[in-house]
Image: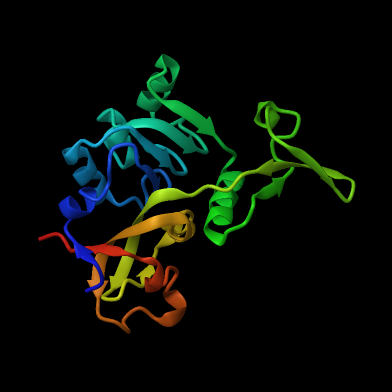
């Protein structure tokens, strides 16, 4: 099986101060066993790039509660009062990015593009310190690409060569962050023989996946 690792071995690849893109939409599509292993290892100073920080005790919220995160780039933190408190105290730096802009910045990083042009955020605090360009009479913010040291993926199914499929809102961020992580580690609910996942259901091809977590005992 492609790059098979236990969660503990996978967490051992992540050094202090690493940047992590983590899939999930309010923890739906988040690799929970991977998160638990990182918490158990206790590596800190992490930058987390994700849609949100879930809730206390769930998904990315476990990393927040454990004090392992120093920077968050996300579209909102409204469901996690611990993230909010740590931002107010200065323990965590939060960059809040409109959701569509966030995913397009990640896509740009994965595709090797120089950035994204968007009107979202013009004439608001989002515009402060950013380049503004004019295209065909319209004004646009230049939003820079995002990449990360690791992309941690939560999938529904994987096959033995790392092809991945997703269910429902787990589609939102996982397939895109798989493009922008220098190392991609996937955790699937089930691992099936090659050919079980129909070709048109493969949303992340195995060529993008470096490691696949072995199934829980």
Q: Residue furthest right?
A: 137
At horizontal 59% and vertical 39% (from top left) the residue drawn is: 98
Is the C terminus in the top left, top right, bottom left or bottom right quadrant? bottom left
Is the N terminus in the top left, top right, bottom left or bottom right quadrant? bottom left
Q: Based on the displayed image, in which of its 4 quarters is residue 20 positioned?
A: top left
At horizontal 32% and vertical 35% (from top left) the residue drawn is: 61
At horizontal 18% and vertical 63% (from top left) the residue drawn is: 214
Q: Residue furthest left?
A: 217
Observer-nearest of 113 and 165: 113
Observer able to see residue 197? yes
Q: Position of residue 5 (x, y in %)?
A: 19, 61
Answer with left or right where residue 165 lies relative to residue 125.
left
Q: Position of residue 136 (x, y in %)?
A: 88, 51
Q: Is residue 152 above or below residue 202?
A: above
Q: Based on the displayed image, in which of its 4 quarters is residue 113 positioned?
A: bottom right
At horizontal 47% and vertical 56% (from top left) the residue drawn is: 180
Q: Is residue 97 above or below residue 148?
A: above
Observer-nearest of 15 and 137: 15
User: In this figure, what is the number of numbered marks?
Assistant: 0
Q: Position of residue 73 (x, y in %)?
A: 48, 37
Observer-nearest of 5 and 114: 114
Observer-nearest of 181 and 66: 181
Observer able to see residue 24? no
Answer with left or right where residue 136 lies relative to residue 36.
right
Q: Residue furthest top?
A: 89
Q: Position of residue 162 (x, y in %)?
A: 32, 71
Q: Based on the displayed image, in which of its 4 quarters is residue 119 positioned?
A: top right
């Amino acid at each position: 099986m492609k790059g098979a690792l236990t969660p503990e071995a996978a967490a051992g690849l992540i050094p202090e101060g690493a940047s992590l893109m983590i899939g999930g939409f309010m923890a739906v599509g988040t690799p929970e066993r991977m998160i638990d292993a990182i918490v158990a290892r206790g590596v800190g100073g992490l930058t987390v790039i994700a849609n949100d920080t879930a809730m206390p005790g769930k998904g990315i919220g476990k990393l927040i509660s454990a004090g392992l995160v120093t920077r968050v780039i996300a579209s909102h933190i409204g469901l996690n009062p611990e993230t909010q408190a740590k931002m107010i105290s200065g323990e965590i730096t939060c960059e809040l990015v409109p959701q569509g802009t966030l995913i397009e910045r990640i896509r740009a990083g994965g595709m090797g593009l120089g950035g994204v042009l968007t009107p979202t955020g013009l004439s608001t605090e989002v515009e402060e310190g950013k380049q503004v360009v004019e295209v065909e009479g319209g004004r646009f913010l230049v939003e820079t690409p995002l990449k990360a040291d690791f992309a941690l993926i939560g999938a529904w199914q994987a096959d033995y060569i790392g092809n991945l499929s997703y269910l429902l809102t787990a589609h939102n961020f996982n397939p895109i962050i798989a493009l922008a992580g220098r190392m991609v580690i996937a955790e699937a609910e089930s691992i099936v023989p090659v050919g079980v996942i129909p070709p048109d259901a493969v949303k992340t091809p195995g060529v993008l996946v470096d490691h696949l977590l072995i199934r829980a005992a």
